[in-house]
Image: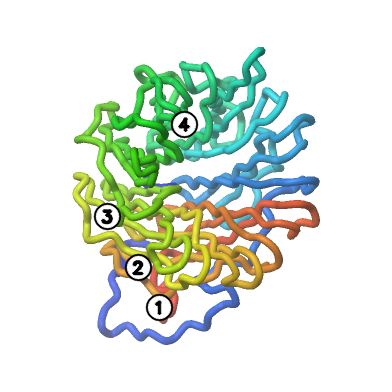
């Protein structure tokens, strides 16, 4: 949704504008940059083995929830866990288990939250159904105080073979859409399917196929919605016969009706473009980012394309990362209600000998705001595969996986930031 997925000249709190008489002075950069709110923090309490694959979603008050999968914590394989935070970054209650079914693996969580703070978490669940194994997409709804709303529920109707890697978006009223990969459901190796739900958790209509083009493989779906409940699904597709990959999207009305045809996002089509992320503002303008092989002159780089709510491109495709040595990959993006945005990615060896998390802010016009900045303070070992969510004021929180930092194999860490505004300048006398 626009509040979680999740103009730039306006000052927070009342939309006051910068005027010529306002004095701007250089801001002293912090070690990791980006004007953080407080220090980097650990999200997970349980630190044995591995906690990874975090997702984050924020409500209209700036409270947020982080979810992740944790190895062996629920007594079996991976389980899904969460932690709630208030808008100041203080924890709300203890870490909690989300999945009720604990046999085998529960992995790859995603979260959506409505304006009141009610939230839904979805994940994929491994099911051993002799003589085959299946994965189903499962969800659990919660009230804004963290209490479960009803039982755990299966999202997908078609359950043969594998349905996995879900994404979810909630509109301000609490209606939500889940999308996922489904194997062999319509004769192809993998396609993207979706299901709409009312705020009560009741399905709205039936499960539907998102992609029109069906040869071979459609994977890595992501979804975002605006304040009216209109939504956009984006994924990457294998192009036959070259076997290159493209980023593709489909727009929908809040009723679930498609808005126009499926469309290709990337302009540059040489080699491979994969792993998209998408975010929309309150009016339905949206931005898609992805990783592209060799396009920035090195290995993987991060690129983006902005769109109006009508689906018309706003300007050309653009490169996000300034540092282009080695790999920049696994992008994430968030937009505030006015369309200001921040893009994150994992960059190899830029902060040392392994991956670190970096970001770039943009105005609603698409103009970069300052330079790219490092998010993680701790730089030993791997930091990456980040997720981000802004609140309505434009403050945002980033979460990622950090190997060895919590004393075990991996943990989930976070960093809060001030509003998405120019980071090299401070507003003298205006807060």
Is residue 408 or residue 37 the one in the foreground?
408
State the SS at label 3.
loop
Q: What's the CA distance linking mark 2 and mark 1? A: 9 Å
Across and down, in percent, residue 112 comes to 48, 39
Q: Are marks 2 and 4 in contact (CB under 8 Å)?
A: no
Dot placed on the residue nearer the N-terminal end, 1 or 3: 3
Which label sits on residue 181? Answer: 4
- Tell me if I can see residue 369 in this picture: yes
Q: What's the CA distance linking mark 1 and mark 3? A: 38 Å
Say left or right for 308 vs 198: left
Q: What's the CA distance linking mark 2 and mark 3? A: 35 Å
Q: What's the CA distance linking mark 2 and mark 4? A: 41 Å
- Callout 3: 10 Å neighbours few (<14), some, many (20+)? few
User: Residue shown at 52%/83% (left/top)?
Assistant: 28
Name the residue beneath numbered marker 2.
Answer: 11
User: Residue shown at 58%/61% (left/top)?
Assistant: 415
Dot placed on the residue nearer the N-terminal end, 2 or 3: 2
Name the residue beneath numbered marker 3.
Answer: 267
Q: Which tag is nearer the camera, tag 4 or tag 3?
A: 3
Residue 51, compared with residue 211, is above or below; it is below
- Callout 1: 10 Å neighbours few (<14), some, many (20+)? some
Which quadrant holds the N terminus? top left
Across and down, in percent, residue 198 comes to 40, 24
Say left or right for 266 vs 111: left
Residue 357, compared with residue 337, is above or below; it is below
Across and down, in percent, residue 101 comes to 68, 23
Name the residue beneath numbered marker 1.
Answer: 427
Dot placed on the residue nearer the N-terminal end, 2 or 4: 2
Label count reads 4
State the SS at label 1.
strand
């Amino acid at each position: 949704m626009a509040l979680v997925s999740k103009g730039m000249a306006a000052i927070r709190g009342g939309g006051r504008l910068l005027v010529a008489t306002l004095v701007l002075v250089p801001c002293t950069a912090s070690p990791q940059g980006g004007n953080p709110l407080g220090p980097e923090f650990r999200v997970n309490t349980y630190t044995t083995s591995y906690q990874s694959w975090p997702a984050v979603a924020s409500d209209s008050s700036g409270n947020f929830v982080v979810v992740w999968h944790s190895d062996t914590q629920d007594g079996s394989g991976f389980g899904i866990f969460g932690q709630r935070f208030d808008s100041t970054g203080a924890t709300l209650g203890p870490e909690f288990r989300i999945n009720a079914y604990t046999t085998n693996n529960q992995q790859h969580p995603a979260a959506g939250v409505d304006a009141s703070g009610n939230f839904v978490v979805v994940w994929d669940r491994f099911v051993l159904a002799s003589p085959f194994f299946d994965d189903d997409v499962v969800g659990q709804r919660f009230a804004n105080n963290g209490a479960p709303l009803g039982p755990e529920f299966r999202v997908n109707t078609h359950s043969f073979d594998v349905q996995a890697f879900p994404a979810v978006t909630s509109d301000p009223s609490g209606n939500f859409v889940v999308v996922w990969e489904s194997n062999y459901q319509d004769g192809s190796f993998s396609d993207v399917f979706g299901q709409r739900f009312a705020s009560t958790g009741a399905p709205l209509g039936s499960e539907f196929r998102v992609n029109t083009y069906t040869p071979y493989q459609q994977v890595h779906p992501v979804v975002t919605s605006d304040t009216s409940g209109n939504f956009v699904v984006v994924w990457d597709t294998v192009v036959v016969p070259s076997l290159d990959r493209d980023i593709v999207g489909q727009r929908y009305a809040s009723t679930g009706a498609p808005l126009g045809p499926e469309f290709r996002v990337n302009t540059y089509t040489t080699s491979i473009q994969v792993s998209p992320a998408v975010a929309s503002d309150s009016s339905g303008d949206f931005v898609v980012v992805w990783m592209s092989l060799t396009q920035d002159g090195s290995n993987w780089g991060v690129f983006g394309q902005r769109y109006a709510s009508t689906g018309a491109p706003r300007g050309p495709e653009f490169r996000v990362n300034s540092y282009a040595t080695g790999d920049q990959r696994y992008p994430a993006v968030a937009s505030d209600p006015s369309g200001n945005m921040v893009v994150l990615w994992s960059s190899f060896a830029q902060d040392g000998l392994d991956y670190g998390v970096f970001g770039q802010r943009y105005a609603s016009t698409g103009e970069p705001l300052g330079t790219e900045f490092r998010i993680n303070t701790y730089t030993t070992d791997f930091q990456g595969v980040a997720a981000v969510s802004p609140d309505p004021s434009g403050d945002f929180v980033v979460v990622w996986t950090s190997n060895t930092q919590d004393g075990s194999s991996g943990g989930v860490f976070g960093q809060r930031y001030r509003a998405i505004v120019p980071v090299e300048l401070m507003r003298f006398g205006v807060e």
